Amino acid sequence: MTAHQPQSQVSCNGRAYGMPTAPTVVVCLDGSEPGYIEATIAAGRAPTFARFMAEGANLEAECVIPSFTNPNNLSIITGRPPAVHGIAGNFFYDPAAGKEVMMNDPEFLRASTILKAFQDAGAKVAMVTAKDKLRGLLSHGLQYAGGRAIAFSAERADQATRRLNGIEDALGFVGRPLPEVYSAGLSEFVFAAGVRLMAVERPDLMYLSTTDYIQHKAGPGTALANDFYAMIDGYLAQLDRQGAIILATADHGMNDKHRRDGTPDVIYLKTLFDNWLGQERARVILPITDPYVVHHGALGSFATVHVPAGTDRAQLIAKLEAIDGIDLAVSREEACRRFELPPDRIGDIVVISSRHKALGTAPELHDLSGLNEPLRSHGGLTEQRVPVLCNRRLAIAPGRGLRNFDAFDLALNCLG
Ligand SMILES: [Zn+2]
């Protein structure tokens, strides 16, 4: 460090962050479509959110496209778009290897996390995520010796070790049993852990990331959603009383993707491409989930399609654009320019469906038996608006368009 660069500045991926003046918590409320929190406030069950909105900051930001969980969590934790960090979905197709490759492993991460940068600068950091699939990416590079970092998932809290997570007996520490993976309890565990960490360890910087199990099931204002946000409200009240600066945003929104009769409203892309190009000539990638997992039927609003070399893409794009329910069909190059995506992890064509339509491969390839409620999902432009709330006032330059991956910048650099 030089005299011109005070040690209170931490640099990460080309952005600079101030050292926190109070313990700072960035929260990613998975799937928090605008309206959930407002509806819970209207029901009289979210006094803390109401106070944050009135006395702190109540803003909106755009998330990254695809409006999926992993790309956005990695953008928030690195402060940069997927073109920089490399995580453009849950998996991608590698044409050279001829196989679909999961992107859960940190080897696919091309940027450092803000938490690591702060630990390197001497700060104590903590991270708790609901699903274990995100833990390795979000905690990449952290050093657990000396008790200066703690990072674990609610899903595998029973397996946390001091060497790999900076904590052992996480269940005993949090004082709760291991939650079910598909439950509101998984997210509650994240908040309970955050409150305990703030009380016992008081990290300088902490990231809490929930799961959108409830938002996939229930829309804003429903009893299920209000119960969930009322639960969150109670934990935010505790963090607030503990003196933390709290900045909450979301990875993406959430919309109904079903017909009036409750059946999923899906455009089946593989069926279309098989008709246009011949059987199995194109490969449709739906990177909302694992290629072999049927969670939510693997139906979202974003797809990328690999087509044989020499295929007339412009003609295919024109055909896609003519279909009712397609918001956008563009080339890889155009998609990567517009959405700041890594070209080597995107297909030849990017397709985005409209607010109430989902994209699938072929009807026979989706197991919808696990869908117990009418489909709600995300991935498109219509799930790009997310809330940004803070328990402190924020000073933001007029006209600045906010992204959800400005979360750490807002919490560390923009307090009013
Ligand atoms: Zn999500």
Image (cartoon, grey):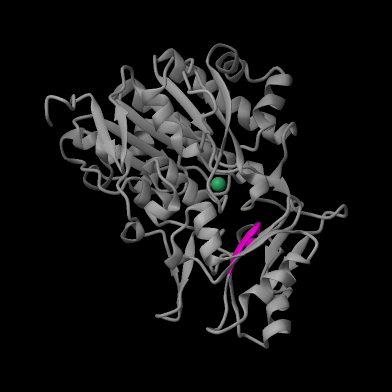
Q: Out of 392 and 377, give the one closest to the viewer.
A: 392
Q: Quadrant of residue 175?
A: top left
Give percent across and percent down for residue 115: 31, 38
Q: Quadrant of residue 7?
A: top left
Q: Out of 385 and 132, give the one closest to the viewer.
A: 385
Give percent across and percent down for residue 67: 57, 50
Which quadrant does the C terminus fall into? top left
Is there any visible trace of residue 176 in the rendered image? no
Depicted 390 relative to depicted 89: above or below: above
Q: In this rendering, would 292 be left or right of 206?
A: right
Q: Out of 171 and 384, give the one closest to the viewer.
A: 384
Q: Residue at x 49, y 60 (%)?
A: 90
Q: Residue at x 21, y 43 (%)?
A: 143
Residue interval drawn in magenta: 298-304
Which quadrant does the N terminus fall into? top left
Q: Count numbered badges in the picture.
A: 0
Q: Is residue 34 magenta?
A: no
